Amino acid sequence: MKYEYLTIALVLSLSVFSVSVFAAESSSTASINVSLINQNPDPARAGEILELRFMVENNGGGDASNIQYEFLPKFPFVAIPGEDYTRTIRTLSAYQEGDDAAIIKFEVLVDREAVKGTNDIELKRIWEGSDITSTVSFDIEVTGTEYAQIIYIDKAKLYPGNETPLKFTITNVGNSPLRDLVFSWSEEDGVILPVYSDDTKYIKNIDVGESVELEYTVVADVNAVQGLYKLDLTLQYETESGVTEELNTQAGIFVGGETDFDVTFSESSEGVTSLSVANVGNNPAYSVTIRIPEQSGYRVTGSTSTIVGNLDKGDYTIVSFQISQSSSVAPTGVDFRQMTAEERAAMREAASQAMVSGNNLEVYIEYTDTTGIRHVIEKDVPIQFRETDSSATTPTTRFGRQSDTSPYTAYVNYGMLAAAVVLILVGYKKREKIKPLLGKLLNRKKT
Protein backbone atom coordinates (compact mmCIF):
# COMPACT_ATOMS: atom_id res chain seq x y z
CA MET A 1 0.00 0.00 0.00
CA LYS A 2 2.84 2.32 0.81
CA TYR A 3 4.36 1.62 -2.60
CA GLU A 4 1.12 2.68 -4.33
CA TYR A 5 1.08 6.04 -2.53
CA LEU A 6 4.70 6.63 -3.39
CA THR A 7 3.98 5.89 -7.07
CA ILE A 8 1.06 8.35 -7.20
CA ALA A 9 3.10 11.03 -5.48
CA LEU A 10 5.92 10.55 -7.94
CA VAL A 11 3.57 10.86 -10.97
CA LEU A 12 1.99 14.04 -9.60
CA SER A 13 5.40 15.55 -9.01
CA LEU A 14 6.47 14.87 -12.58
CA SER A 15 3.22 16.38 -13.93
CA VAL A 16 3.70 19.59 -11.95
CA PHE A 17 7.28 19.82 -13.18
CA SER A 18 6.18 19.41 -16.82
CA VAL A 19 3.51 22.14 -16.55
CA SER A 20 6.03 24.48 -14.93
CA VAL A 21 8.55 23.85 -17.71
CA PHE A 22 5.89 24.41 -20.42
CA ALA A 23 4.70 27.65 -18.78
CA ALA A 24 8.27 28.88 -18.56
CA GLU A 25 8.89 28.09 -22.19
CA SER A 26 5.60 29.84 -23.27
CA SER A 27 6.33 32.97 -21.29
CA SER A 28 9.66 33.35 -23.08
CA THR A 29 8.22 33.01 -26.66
CA ALA A 30 7.25 36.01 -28.82
CA SER A 31 3.69 36.20 -30.25
CA ILE A 32 3.32 38.62 -33.20
CA ASN A 33 -0.02 40.05 -34.26
CA VAL A 34 -0.85 42.69 -36.92
CA SER A 35 -4.05 44.71 -37.29
CA LEU A 36 -5.33 47.47 -39.62
CA ILE A 37 -5.87 50.58 -37.55
CA ASN A 38 -6.54 53.29 -40.18
CA GLN A 39 -7.17 53.93 -43.87
CA ASN A 40 -7.41 57.24 -45.70
CA PRO A 41 -9.77 57.87 -47.36
CA ASP A 42 -12.38 55.65 -45.79
CA PRO A 43 -13.96 54.23 -47.86
CA ALA A 44 -11.26 54.01 -50.51
CA ARG A 45 -12.08 55.90 -53.72
CA ALA A 46 -11.49 54.54 -57.20
CA GLY A 47 -8.76 56.40 -59.02
CA GLU A 48 -7.21 57.81 -55.85
CA ILE A 49 -4.29 56.90 -53.57
CA LEU A 50 -5.13 54.89 -50.46
CA GLU A 51 -3.00 55.11 -47.31
CA LEU A 52 -3.06 52.08 -44.97
CA ARG A 53 -1.67 52.00 -41.39
CA PHE A 54 -1.03 48.74 -39.52
CA MET A 55 -0.15 48.10 -35.86
CA VAL A 56 2.27 45.25 -35.10
CA GLU A 57 2.24 43.94 -31.51
CA ASN A 58 4.22 41.32 -29.55
CA ASN A 59 1.84 39.62 -27.14
CA GLY A 60 4.43 37.05 -25.99
CA GLY A 61 7.13 37.11 -23.36
CA GLY A 62 10.02 36.74 -25.76
CA ASP A 63 11.65 39.33 -27.99
CA ALA A 64 11.41 39.18 -31.79
CA SER A 65 13.74 40.68 -34.38
CA ASN A 66 13.73 41.42 -38.10
CA ILE A 67 10.02 40.97 -38.60
CA GLN A 68 9.29 41.69 -42.27
CA TYR A 69 5.92 42.49 -43.83
CA GLU A 70 5.39 42.64 -47.59
CA PHE A 71 2.32 44.21 -49.18
CA LEU A 72 0.99 42.12 -52.09
CA PRO A 73 -0.89 44.46 -54.52
CA LYS A 74 -3.72 42.90 -56.50
CA PHE A 75 -6.72 44.36 -58.33
CA PRO A 76 -8.23 46.78 -57.63
CA PHE A 77 -5.13 47.91 -55.71
CA VAL A 78 -2.23 48.87 -57.95
CA ALA A 79 1.39 49.42 -56.96
CA ILE A 80 2.59 53.01 -57.28
CA PRO A 81 5.74 53.15 -59.44
CA GLY A 82 8.84 53.64 -57.29
CA GLU A 83 7.08 52.73 -54.06
CA ASP A 84 8.71 50.11 -51.74
CA TYR A 85 6.17 47.60 -50.46
CA THR A 86 8.38 45.87 -47.87
CA ARG A 87 8.62 47.01 -44.22
CA THR A 88 11.04 45.57 -41.61
CA ILE A 89 10.77 45.89 -37.82
CA ARG A 90 14.23 45.39 -36.39
CA THR A 91 13.21 44.60 -32.79
CA LEU A 92 9.89 43.99 -31.10
CA SER A 93 10.29 43.46 -27.37
CA ALA A 94 8.23 41.15 -25.21
CA TYR A 95 4.74 42.48 -24.52
CA GLN A 96 5.30 45.52 -26.76
CA GLU A 97 1.62 46.29 -27.22
CA GLY A 98 -0.90 49.15 -27.49
CA ASP A 99 0.70 52.58 -27.62
CA ASP A 100 4.13 50.95 -27.66
CA ALA A 101 3.40 48.78 -30.67
CA ALA A 102 5.19 49.32 -34.00
CA ILE A 103 3.34 51.14 -36.81
CA ILE A 104 3.92 50.42 -40.49
CA LYS A 105 2.37 52.32 -43.44
CA PHE A 106 1.73 51.55 -47.10
CA GLU A 107 0.33 53.67 -49.97
CA VAL A 108 -1.36 52.08 -52.95
CA LEU A 109 -3.37 53.31 -55.94
CA VAL A 110 -6.99 52.23 -56.29
CA ASP A 111 -7.72 51.41 -59.92
CA ARG A 112 -10.23 53.69 -61.70
CA GLU A 113 -12.19 50.60 -62.74
CA ALA A 114 -12.56 49.39 -59.18
CA VAL A 115 -15.97 47.94 -58.44
CA LYS A 116 -17.87 49.43 -55.58
CA GLY A 117 -17.88 47.06 -52.60
CA THR A 118 -15.56 45.14 -50.28
CA ASN A 119 -12.12 44.12 -51.54
CA ASP A 120 -9.33 42.39 -49.65
CA ILE A 121 -5.63 43.17 -49.33
CA GLU A 122 -2.88 40.78 -48.24
CA LEU A 123 0.26 41.12 -46.10
CA LYS A 124 2.94 38.47 -46.14
CA ARG A 125 4.94 38.03 -42.88
CA ILE A 126 8.48 36.69 -42.58
CA TRP A 127 9.93 36.34 -39.06
CA GLU A 128 13.63 35.83 -38.50
CA GLY A 129 14.33 32.85 -36.30
CA SER A 130 10.98 31.36 -37.11
CA ASP A 131 10.03 28.99 -39.88
CA ILE A 132 6.52 30.47 -39.93
CA THR A 133 5.70 32.42 -43.13
CA SER A 134 2.10 33.51 -43.12
CA THR A 135 -0.24 35.73 -45.11
CA VAL A 136 -2.92 37.80 -43.45
CA SER A 137 -5.88 39.48 -45.23
CA PHE A 138 -7.92 42.60 -44.50
CA ASP A 139 -11.18 43.85 -45.98
CA ILE A 140 -11.16 47.31 -47.58
CA GLU A 141 -14.35 49.14 -48.53
CA VAL A 142 -14.08 50.78 -51.97
CA THR A 143 -16.47 53.32 -53.47
CA GLY A 144 -16.61 54.51 -57.06
CA THR A 145 -15.22 57.80 -58.34
CA GLU A 146 -17.64 60.69 -58.49
CA TYR A 147 -16.30 62.81 -61.30
CA ALA A 148 -18.08 65.10 -63.71
CA GLN A 149 -16.68 66.83 -66.74
CA ILE A 150 -17.94 69.73 -68.83
CA ILE A 151 -16.81 68.30 -72.11
CA TYR A 152 -18.69 70.29 -74.75
CA ILE A 153 -19.86 73.81 -75.54
CA ASP A 154 -21.74 73.97 -78.83
CA LYS A 155 -20.79 77.54 -79.77
CA ALA A 156 -17.35 78.99 -80.36
CA LYS A 157 -18.52 82.31 -81.80
CA LEU A 158 -21.18 84.88 -80.89
CA TYR A 159 -22.43 87.73 -83.07
CA PRO A 160 -22.80 91.04 -81.17
CA GLY A 161 -26.39 92.07 -80.54
CA ASN A 162 -27.88 88.73 -81.61
CA GLU A 163 -29.70 86.31 -79.33
CA THR A 164 -27.78 83.04 -79.59
CA PRO A 165 -28.63 79.63 -78.07
CA LEU A 166 -25.67 78.33 -76.05
CA LYS A 167 -25.57 74.72 -74.86
CA PHE A 168 -23.30 73.13 -72.22
CA THR A 169 -22.97 69.33 -71.98
CA ILE A 170 -22.04 67.80 -68.60
CA THR A 171 -20.97 64.15 -68.50
CA ASN A 172 -20.42 61.80 -65.57
CA VAL A 173 -17.07 60.23 -66.47
CA GLY A 174 -16.67 58.52 -63.08
CA ASN A 175 -18.07 55.20 -61.95
CA SER A 176 -20.49 56.45 -59.32
CA PRO A 177 -23.71 58.43 -59.77
CA LEU A 178 -23.72 62.18 -59.16
CA ARG A 179 -26.55 63.98 -57.44
CA ASP A 180 -27.69 67.49 -56.56
CA LEU A 181 -25.56 69.23 -59.18
CA VAL A 182 -25.43 73.02 -59.50
CA PHE A 183 -23.91 74.53 -62.67
CA SER A 184 -23.16 78.21 -63.28
CA TRP A 185 -21.00 80.33 -65.55
CA SER A 186 -19.91 83.96 -65.78
CA GLU A 187 -17.91 86.35 -67.95
CA GLU A 188 -15.99 88.88 -65.89
CA ASP A 189 -16.38 91.86 -68.26
CA GLY A 190 -20.16 91.50 -68.57
CA VAL A 191 -19.92 91.44 -72.36
CA ILE A 192 -21.72 88.07 -72.59
CA LEU A 193 -24.87 87.65 -70.51
CA PRO A 194 -27.79 85.21 -70.37
CA VAL A 195 -31.30 86.41 -71.21
CA TYR A 196 -34.64 84.96 -70.12
CA SER A 197 -32.90 83.24 -67.18
CA ASP A 198 -29.98 83.57 -64.77
CA ASP A 199 -26.68 81.78 -65.19
CA THR A 200 -27.44 78.92 -62.75
CA LYS A 201 -28.97 75.53 -63.56
CA TYR A 202 -29.85 72.67 -61.20
CA ILE A 203 -29.58 68.93 -61.97
CA LYS A 204 -31.03 66.27 -59.68
CA ASN A 205 -28.66 63.43 -60.70
CA ILE A 206 -26.49 62.04 -63.50
CA ASP A 207 -25.90 58.29 -63.73
CA VAL A 208 -22.57 56.76 -64.68
CA GLY A 209 -21.67 57.46 -68.32
CA GLU A 210 -24.68 59.68 -68.92
CA SER A 211 -24.78 63.32 -70.01
CA VAL A 212 -27.07 66.28 -69.41
CA GLU A 213 -27.45 69.28 -71.73
CA LEU A 214 -28.02 72.73 -70.25
CA GLU A 215 -29.36 75.37 -72.64
CA TYR A 216 -29.09 79.14 -72.33
CA THR A 217 -29.96 82.07 -74.54
CA VAL A 218 -27.14 84.60 -74.48
CA VAL A 219 -26.43 88.00 -76.02
CA ALA A 220 -23.05 89.60 -76.61
CA ASP A 221 -22.96 93.39 -76.20
CA VAL A 222 -23.52 95.11 -79.55
CA ASN A 223 -20.63 97.46 -78.74
CA ALA A 224 -18.29 94.66 -77.65
CA VAL A 225 -14.73 94.75 -78.88
CA GLN A 226 -14.19 91.81 -81.19
CA GLY A 227 -12.01 89.13 -79.64
CA LEU A 228 -11.80 86.04 -77.42
CA TYR A 229 -13.61 86.16 -74.08
CA LYS A 230 -13.16 83.80 -71.11
CA LEU A 231 -16.09 82.00 -69.51
CA ASP A 232 -15.60 80.81 -65.91
CA LEU A 233 -17.51 77.55 -65.38
CA THR A 234 -18.40 76.12 -61.97
CA LEU A 235 -20.00 72.76 -61.17
CA GLN A 236 -20.87 71.59 -57.66
CA TYR A 237 -22.11 68.09 -56.89
CA GLU A 238 -22.62 65.80 -53.91
CA THR A 239 -20.88 62.44 -53.56
CA GLU A 240 -22.41 59.26 -52.16
CA SER A 241 -20.68 59.94 -48.87
CA GLY A 242 -22.42 63.32 -48.63
CA VAL A 243 -19.32 65.40 -49.40
CA THR A 244 -19.79 68.39 -51.74
CA GLU A 245 -17.22 68.60 -54.51
CA GLU A 246 -16.60 71.58 -56.80
CA LEU A 247 -15.20 71.62 -60.31
CA ASN A 248 -13.86 74.90 -61.70
CA THR A 249 -12.77 75.26 -65.29
CA GLN A 250 -12.67 77.77 -68.14
CA ALA A 251 -13.76 77.99 -71.75
CA GLY A 252 -13.17 80.53 -74.49
CA ILE A 253 -15.77 82.03 -76.82
CA PHE A 254 -15.17 84.48 -79.65
CA VAL A 255 -17.30 87.61 -80.08
CA GLY A 256 -17.35 88.88 -83.64
CA GLY A 257 -17.33 87.21 -87.02
CA GLU A 258 -19.32 87.94 -90.14
CA THR A 259 -21.28 91.01 -91.16
CA ASP A 260 -23.77 92.05 -93.88
CA PHE A 261 -23.96 94.71 -96.55
CA ASP A 262 -26.56 96.75 -98.37
CA VAL A 263 -25.89 97.84 -101.96
CA THR A 264 -28.06 100.42 -103.71
CA PHE A 265 -27.96 102.24 -107.03
CA SER A 266 -26.73 105.82 -106.56
CA GLU A 267 -26.64 107.45 -110.00
CA SER A 268 -25.66 106.92 -113.62
CA SER A 269 -24.18 109.76 -115.64
CA GLU A 270 -22.11 109.89 -118.81
CA GLY A 271 -21.47 106.16 -118.81
CA VAL A 272 -20.42 105.98 -115.13
CA THR A 273 -22.69 104.10 -112.71
CA SER A 274 -22.25 104.70 -108.97
CA LEU A 275 -23.26 102.28 -106.23
CA SER A 276 -23.59 102.91 -102.48
CA VAL A 277 -22.17 100.11 -100.31
CA ALA A 278 -22.99 100.13 -96.57
CA ASN A 279 -21.91 97.79 -93.76
CA VAL A 280 -25.27 97.13 -92.08
CA GLY A 281 -24.00 94.37 -89.75
CA ASN A 282 -22.59 94.58 -86.22
CA ASN A 283 -19.01 93.67 -87.09
CA PRO A 284 -16.34 95.50 -89.05
CA ALA A 285 -15.27 94.21 -92.45
CA TYR A 286 -11.65 94.18 -93.57
CA SER A 287 -10.13 94.34 -97.05
CA VAL A 288 -13.47 94.94 -98.76
CA THR A 289 -13.53 94.57 -102.55
CA ILE A 290 -16.54 95.29 -104.79
CA ARG A 291 -16.64 93.31 -108.03
CA ILE A 292 -19.02 93.22 -110.98
CA PRO A 293 -19.00 89.69 -112.42
CA GLU A 294 -19.55 88.91 -116.05
CA GLN A 295 -23.29 88.67 -116.68
CA SER A 296 -25.85 88.92 -119.44
CA GLY A 297 -27.48 92.28 -120.07
CA TYR A 298 -24.56 94.39 -118.82
CA ARG A 299 -21.06 95.16 -119.95
CA VAL A 300 -18.29 96.73 -117.84
CA THR A 301 -15.69 98.85 -119.58
CA GLY A 302 -12.37 99.04 -117.74
CA SER A 303 -11.83 97.54 -114.29
CA THR A 304 -14.48 95.18 -112.96
CA SER A 305 -13.44 95.49 -109.29
CA THR A 306 -12.72 98.23 -106.79
CA ILE A 307 -10.79 97.89 -103.51
CA VAL A 308 -12.61 99.72 -100.74
CA GLY A 309 -10.43 98.79 -97.74
CA ASN A 310 -11.99 98.48 -94.27
CA LEU A 311 -15.60 99.30 -93.48
CA ASP A 312 -16.59 99.62 -89.83
CA LYS A 313 -20.16 98.83 -88.84
CA GLY A 314 -22.46 101.62 -89.99
CA ASP A 315 -19.95 102.98 -92.52
CA TYR A 316 -20.64 103.28 -96.24
CA THR A 317 -18.78 104.18 -99.41
CA ILE A 318 -19.46 105.01 -103.06
CA VAL A 319 -17.96 102.93 -105.85
CA SER A 320 -18.22 103.66 -109.57
CA PHE A 321 -17.96 101.52 -112.68
CA GLN A 322 -18.32 102.15 -116.40
CA ILE A 323 -21.40 100.02 -116.98
CA SER A 324 -23.50 99.88 -120.10
CA GLN A 325 -26.26 97.62 -121.20
CA SER A 326 -25.64 95.16 -123.99
CA SER A 327 -26.69 96.76 -127.33
CA SER A 328 -27.98 93.60 -128.99
CA VAL A 329 -31.47 92.56 -128.03
CA ALA A 330 -31.92 89.90 -130.64
CA PRO A 331 -32.02 86.38 -129.24
CA THR A 332 -29.41 84.07 -130.63
CA GLY A 333 -30.55 82.27 -133.78
CA VAL A 334 -33.53 84.57 -134.48
CA ASP A 335 -33.91 85.82 -138.10
CA PHE A 336 -35.72 89.17 -138.09
CA ARG A 337 -36.56 88.77 -141.79
CA GLN A 338 -38.89 85.94 -140.88
CA MET A 339 -40.68 87.96 -138.17
CA THR A 340 -43.92 89.82 -138.78
CA ALA A 341 -44.17 93.55 -138.31
CA GLU A 342 -46.13 93.02 -135.09
CA GLU A 343 -43.42 90.71 -133.66
CA ARG A 344 -40.67 93.18 -134.51
CA ALA A 345 -42.66 96.01 -132.92
CA ALA A 346 -43.21 93.93 -129.75
CA MET A 347 -39.49 93.17 -129.49
CA ARG A 348 -38.59 96.82 -129.93
CA GLU A 349 -41.07 97.77 -127.21
CA ALA A 350 -39.63 95.16 -124.83
CA ALA A 351 -36.10 96.35 -125.53
CA SER A 352 -37.13 99.94 -124.90
CA GLN A 353 -38.71 99.05 -121.58
CA ALA A 354 -35.62 97.06 -120.55
CA MET A 355 -33.41 100.00 -121.32
CA VAL A 356 -35.56 102.44 -119.36
CA SER A 357 -36.21 100.29 -116.29
CA GLY A 358 -33.12 98.11 -116.34
CA ASN A 359 -32.52 94.59 -114.98
CA ASN A 360 -30.92 93.76 -111.62
CA LEU A 361 -27.16 94.13 -111.63
CA GLU A 362 -25.31 91.29 -109.90
CA VAL A 363 -22.65 92.60 -107.49
CA TYR A 364 -20.09 90.62 -105.45
CA ILE A 365 -18.78 91.89 -102.10
CA GLU A 366 -15.62 90.19 -100.93
CA TYR A 367 -14.36 90.85 -97.37
CA THR A 368 -12.47 89.37 -94.42
CA ASP A 369 -14.36 89.01 -91.12
CA THR A 370 -12.97 89.56 -87.63
CA THR A 371 -11.91 85.91 -87.37
CA GLY A 372 -9.75 86.19 -90.49
CA ILE A 373 -12.09 84.21 -92.75
CA ARG A 374 -12.70 85.49 -96.28
CA HIS A 375 -16.34 85.72 -97.48
CA VAL A 376 -18.17 86.55 -100.70
CA ILE A 377 -21.68 88.02 -100.59
CA GLU A 378 -23.85 88.30 -103.70
CA LYS A 379 -26.29 91.20 -104.10
CA ASP A 380 -28.81 91.96 -106.86
CA VAL A 381 -29.07 95.71 -107.37
CA PRO A 382 -31.89 97.30 -109.43
CA ILE A 383 -30.33 99.71 -111.96
CA GLN A 384 -32.24 102.65 -113.46
CA PHE A 385 -30.61 104.09 -116.58
CA ARG A 386 -31.83 107.43 -117.96
CA GLU A 387 -32.80 107.60 -121.64
CA THR A 388 -30.47 110.53 -122.22
CA ASP A 389 -27.60 108.67 -120.60
CA SER A 390 -25.02 107.76 -123.19
CA SER A 391 -24.36 104.55 -121.23
CA ALA A 392 -27.96 103.45 -121.81
CA THR A 393 -27.72 103.11 -125.52
CA THR A 394 -31.03 102.43 -127.20
CA PRO A 395 -30.87 98.91 -128.56
CA THR A 396 -30.39 98.50 -132.25
CA THR A 397 -31.09 95.59 -134.51
CA ARG A 398 -30.22 94.78 -138.09
CA PHE A 399 -33.34 96.75 -139.06
CA GLY A 400 -31.92 100.01 -137.77
CA ARG A 401 -32.28 102.17 -134.74
CA GLN A 402 -35.51 101.93 -132.83
CA SER A 403 -37.72 105.05 -133.04
CA ASP A 404 -38.45 107.03 -129.94
CA THR A 405 -42.01 106.19 -128.92
CA SER A 406 -41.96 107.18 -125.28
CA PRO A 407 -45.20 108.72 -123.85
CA TYR A 408 -43.35 111.93 -122.97
CA THR A 409 -42.31 112.50 -126.60
CA ALA A 410 -45.84 111.83 -127.82
CA TYR A 411 -47.27 114.43 -125.44
CA VAL A 412 -44.75 117.03 -126.64
CA ASN A 413 -45.61 116.36 -130.28
CA TYR A 414 -49.34 116.68 -129.62
CA GLY A 415 -48.77 119.97 -127.81
CA MET A 416 -46.74 121.45 -130.63
CA LEU A 417 -49.37 120.42 -133.16
CA ALA A 418 -52.15 122.04 -131.14
CA ALA A 419 -50.16 125.27 -130.79
CA ALA A 420 -49.61 125.40 -134.56
CA VAL A 421 -53.34 124.99 -135.23
CA VAL A 422 -54.16 127.79 -132.80
CA LEU A 423 -51.68 130.15 -134.46
CA ILE A 424 -53.08 129.36 -137.91
CA LEU A 425 -56.63 130.06 -136.79
CA VAL A 426 -55.69 133.27 -135.08
CA GLY A 427 -53.75 134.41 -138.13
CA TYR A 428 -56.63 133.58 -140.44
CA LYS A 429 -59.15 135.58 -138.44
CA LYS A 430 -56.88 138.56 -138.27
CA ARG A 431 -56.35 138.40 -142.03
CA GLU A 432 -60.14 138.49 -142.65
CA LYS A 433 -60.44 141.61 -140.49
CA ILE A 434 -57.50 143.38 -142.09
CA LYS A 435 -58.61 142.69 -145.71
CA PRO A 436 -61.40 145.44 -145.92
CA LEU A 437 -59.05 147.99 -144.43
CA LEU A 438 -56.45 147.27 -147.04
CA GLY A 439 -59.07 147.73 -149.79
CA LYS A 440 -60.06 151.19 -148.56
CA LEU A 441 -56.43 152.25 -148.36
CA LEU A 442 -55.83 151.16 -151.95
CA ASN A 443 -58.89 153.08 -153.27
CA ARG A 444 -57.73 156.26 -151.56
CA LYS A 445 -54.35 156.04 -153.24
CA LYS A 446 -55.95 155.64 -156.68
CA THR A 447 -58.05 158.77 -156.28
Image (cartoon, helix red, strand yellow):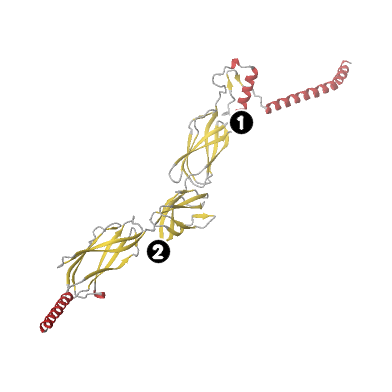
Front residue of 158 and 78: 78
- Mark 2 or mark 1, earlier in chain: 2
Determine the image quadrant of residue 276.
top right
Question: Quarter of the image holding residue 239?
Answer: bottom left
> Which residue lies under the disc numbered 1?
357
Q: Residues within 10 Å of mark 2 (few under 14, many from 20)?
A: few
Question: With respect to residue 436, does 185 lie above or below?
Answer: below
Q: Nearer the viewer, mark 2 or mark 1?
A: 2
Q: Amino acid at mark 2?
A: Ser
Q: Quadrant of the C terminus?
A: top right
Picture layout, residue 133 above or below residue 347? below
Q: Position of residue 95 (x, y in %)?
A: 21, 75
Q: Amino acid at mark 1?
A: Ser
Residue extending farthest to the left is 3
SS under mark 2: loop
Q: Residue at x 24, y 73 (%)?
A: 101
**Residue 387 shows in this picture:** no
Q: Which residue occupies the extreme bottom position in the image?
A: 2
